[in-house]
Image (spheres, helix red, strand yellow):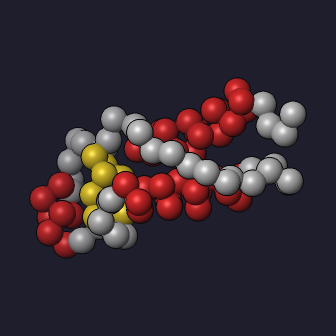
Amino acid sequence: MLLDFKAFKTLVQENIGVVVDHGLILKKNRDNQALFNPSDLKIFWMESEPTAEKLVEWIAETLTPLLPEKVALRKLKLY
């Protein structure tokens, strides 16, 4: 076994889930910040438009350095 699924699930929840779950994902720009800051909403600011492709890219970039040695992220699917 390379990585226990429970350990991977915890890794994802602690580094991805807490950041975006039940939140609003917006591009960080002057207009959006003027509309939503300050706000009671949970907001995840992205440097680019928050497309599915950019979200997957961010998830991969976030998780990759956290994986144990000899474990590589080969495929990522966003639902």
Q: Quadrant of the C terminus?
A: top left
Residue at the extreme top of the image, as rendered: 6
Q: Residue 48: percent from the left, percent from the top?
A: 34, 69
Q: Foreground residue, 51 or 26?
A: 51
Q: Quadrant of residue 62?
A: bottom right
Residue shown at 86% from the left, 53% from the top: 70
Relative to 17, is 35 on the left or the right? left
Q: Quadrant of the N terminus?
A: top right
Q: Quadrant of residue 78?
A: top left
Q: Foreground residue, 70 or 65?
A: 70
Residue shown at 49% from the left, 39% from the top: 17
Residue shown at 12% from the left, 59% from the top: 35
Tell me how many marks there are: 0
Q: Residue 57: percent from the left, percent from the top?
A: 50, 61
Q: Residue 19: percent from the left, percent from the top?
A: 45, 45
Relative to 41, is 68 on the left or the right? right
Classify 49 as above or below 7: below
Classify 49 as above or below 41: below
Residue shown at 20% from the left, 57% from the top: 37
Q: Foreground residue, 50 or 24?
A: 50
Relative to 78, is 42 on the left or the right? left
